[in-house]
Image (cartoon, helix red, strand yellow):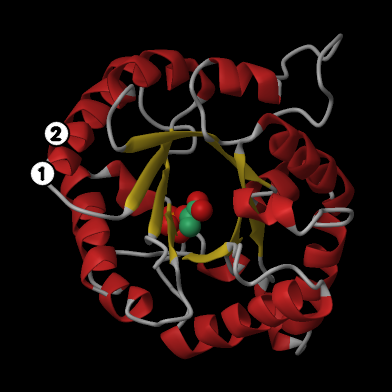
């Protein structure tokens, strides 16, 4: 049985001291809890101090983004090797905020996925449709195009280091989550894409997470769905008790 994966995306929030306090509290709480793979994605400036706190604990560390080039003259960028160097075992790739605000394309996401795999870092690839695309009935086409572009050239074995986060753009940070039925429909479609048309091994597996306004109130029914292997949590992961409640629900489901 694969453990649920719950990732807290702290986005551009918390100073290093706050991130460290939160990480310390999570490490303590997790030491008293069984199961669930729990990961936090602090801002870059907090990765190193937080890595010193999570070392040897059950709390994993993720980068929120990294450069699609390996190294060199890319002022302001951070490489995948740098993420690994500070103890990241995971990296978010292609978050909708990166796509919408910083113009990230499926092609760049694909380059990043390959770099993460080469480093043995679990790539958490985010896909999702906008409200307009959903209204126009384009959701499945959008998801398929994103998956084909983002996962091009991956070998079946590499998907052991892959998680897909289905994050409808209209649900991110809006307080309006997808219903379990809406999420399940897309998760089934993603599963069929991965293990059907792409021919990846279902035995190796890749977890499919839901993200978009997950809260302690709605997580039970979302995470209770067999198709949903975990959650990518933004806003609610900034509050210790809320995030812990979501982690607890993932275990009960
Ligand atoms: C996210 O940032 O990936 C996210 C899902 O945010 P929120 O939970 O705040 O909607």
**In the image, 193: left or right of 176?**
right
Q: Quadrant of residue 188?
A: bottom right
Counting from the top left corner in percent of width and height, residue 49 is at 37, 13
Counting from the top left corner in percent of width and height, residue 2 is at 42, 63
The residue closer to the viewer here, 58 or 224, is: 58
**Quarter the N terminus occupies:** bottom left
Please state which of the two labelled residues, at mark 2 or mark 1, is closer to the viewer.
1
Q: Can residue 252 be seen in this view?
A: yes
Counting from the top left corner in percent of width and height, residue 209 is at 50, 64
**In the image, 179: left or right of 239?**
right
Which residue has dot 1 on it?
A: 32
Q: Give the CA distance from mark 2 to mark 1.
A: 7 Å
**In the image, 69: left or right of 174?**
right
Which residue has dot 2 on it?
A: 28
Q: Quadrant of residue 14?
A: top left
Q: Judge whether 212 appears above or below 94 on screen.
A: below
Q: Extreme left residue here?
A: 32
Q: Are marks 2 and 1 in contact (CB under 8 Å)?
A: yes
Q: Which residue is drawn at 26% across and 57% down?
A: 247
| Ligand 1 lies under 8 Å from the Cβ of mark 2 | no
**Quarter the C terminus occupies:** bottom left
Task: Check disc 2 and report its element: helix, strand or loop.
Answer: helix
Q: Can residue 103 be seen in this view?
A: no
The crowding category of the residue bearing disc 1, from other C-alpha atoms within 10 Å (few below 14, some 14 to 19, many at least 20), is few
Counting from the top left corner in percent of width and height, residue 105 is at 84, 49
């Amino acid at each position: 049985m694969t453990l649920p994966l719950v990732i807290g995306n702290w986005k551009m929030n918390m100073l290093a001291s706050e991130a460290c306090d939160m990480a310390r509290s999570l490490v303590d709480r997790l030491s008293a809890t069984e199961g669930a793979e729990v990961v936090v994605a602090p801002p870059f400036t907090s990765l190193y101090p937080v890595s010193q706190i999570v070392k040897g604990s059950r709390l994993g560390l993720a980068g929120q983004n990294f450069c699609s080039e390996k190294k060199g003259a890319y002022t302001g960028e951070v490489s995948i090797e740098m993420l690994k160097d500070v103890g990241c075992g995971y990296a978010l790739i292609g978050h909708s905020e990166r796509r919408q605000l910083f113009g990230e394309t499926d092609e760049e996401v694909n380059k990043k996925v390959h770099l993460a795999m080469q480093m043995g870092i679990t790539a958490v690839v985010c896909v999702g449709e906008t409200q307009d695309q959903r209204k126009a009935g384009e959701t499945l086409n959008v998801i398929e195009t994103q998956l084909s572009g983002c996962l091009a050239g991956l070998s079946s074995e590499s998907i052991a280091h892959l998680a897909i986060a289905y994050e409808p753009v209209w649900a991110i940070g809006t307080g309006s989550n997808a219903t379990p039925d809406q999420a399940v429909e897309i998760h089934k479609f993603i599963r069929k894409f991965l293990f059907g048309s792409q021919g990846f091994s279902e035995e190796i597996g890749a977890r499919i997470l839901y993200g978009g306004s997950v809260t302690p109130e709605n997580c039970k029914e979302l995470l209770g769905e067999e198709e949903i292997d975990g959650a990518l949590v933004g806003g609610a992961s900034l509050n210790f008790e809320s995030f812990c409640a979501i982690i607890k629900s993932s275990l009960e489901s």
